[in-house]
Amino acid sequence: MLLSEFDFQLPPELIATRPLTPRGEAKLLVSTGGQLKDARVANICKFLRAGDRLVLNNTKVIPARLNGVRLRHSVQGLVTAKIEVTLIQPMSSGKWKALIKPLRKLQVGEVIVFREGLTATCTDKFDGQATLSFSVQGNELDSAIDVSGEMPLPPYIASKRAADEQDRLDYQTVWAKHRGAVAAPTASLHLDELALATLADHGVDITFITLHVGAGTFLPVKVEDIRTHKMHAEWGQVSAQSVAEIKATKLKGGRIIPVGTTALRLIETASRSGSLNPFEGETEIFIYPGFKFQVTDGLMTNFHLPQSTLLMLVAAFVGKNELDAIYRHAINNAYRFFSYGDASLLFPK
């Protein structure tokens, strides 16, 4: 399939820059075998059955965007200049891969100074990224990042406004546990403690898995033949307990419904042998039309960017014609799009 087949025109006013409050007030477009129904996230139990199981990603977004100044010795003495750093992936060495603005002016060996005395040295530059070695490590580094950093809002929001303290709550799930994501599993942002309690009362079970969402989720597809696109790698874990819970639900006839494309990608990664197994490591799975789903029966997800791999995943799940109908309906009915936007609940034919 061609990249151009996944393009659409979105009125700019439909791009959400803040979430609705409370979280359950967001719209929910339900597609059951191509039949569309408008609802609210707060009423999601109307479309779920006792014995269904939601799969939630319990990654925790770190405030990965850091503003600082770079220090460089020159013939004029010590030179400083503003610089923006977005952490994208920790390395086994303790260093971090990072996106830098402006990268071309940062030299290997230069020191970047952030708030509270935190510093980092550029040790390498490659493929439009830099490697940074921080002045502290472990829990001390985590604490310093929490103080110095801002939530790494997606480019389509960051271009309209700066991140603020409210985003530390809004851009984080209520069950976030394991640090490591630099982007939120955004479909999960719609569910709060009340929603979880309501789901439990309805007989819907919950399984937690972990996928540390990377900044690569926002990278554009640059090839016309989407089959040649290479996905970014993200670290994930599906525990033996999670596997047992999902298999038990399947045996009882319940449906497995990932909340978000990240949760779907991880459980399908763990099922590539044809059977769901425990998994820990990096996944580069790219799901596009023609993909054979092993575990997933339904999907809750937001409305995604044109020409994005996330849009291609949804097309693979429900079919390209149904995808087009869903997005036409969402645009015509003023659904809010992208990370802070409304949601869909999809059950394919």
Image (tube, rainbow, N blue to C red):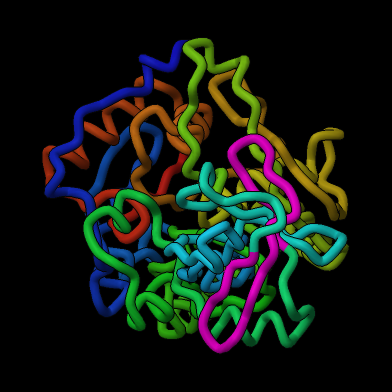
**112 falls in the magenta region:** yes
Q: Nearer the viewer, residue 134 or 59?
A: 134
Residue at image x 55%, y 88%?
116
Task: Kindly tell me whether residue 348 is visible in this rendering.
Answer: no
Seen from the viewer's position, the closer of residues 180 and 245 is 180
Q: Is residue 84 magenta?
A: no
Q: Is residue 140 above or below residue 202?
A: below
Query: Please, what is the dominant secondary structure of the magenta stretch?
Result: strand
- Please give the name of the residue rendered at 74% of the width and 58% of the height, measured from the top-left corner: 246
Left or right, 287 with respect to 84, comes to: right
Q: Residue at x 64, y 35 (%)?
A: 127
How far across and down, in percent of the image, does residue 129 sit? 62, 45
Q: Is residue 29 left or right of residue 124?
A: left
Residue 145 at x, y percent in the picture: 59, 78
Q: Which one is nearer the viewer's eye here, 76 or 334? A: 76
Residue at the image position 35 percent from the left and 20 percent from the top? 321
Residue range in magenta is 111-132
Q: On the rendered structure, is 309 left or right of 11?
A: right
In the image shown, does 203 or 209 lie closer to the viewer?
209
Q: Is residue 94 above or below residue 119?
A: above
Q: Position of residue 24 (x, y in %)?
A: 31, 72
Name the spot of residue 93 as percent of width and height, x first. 87, 61
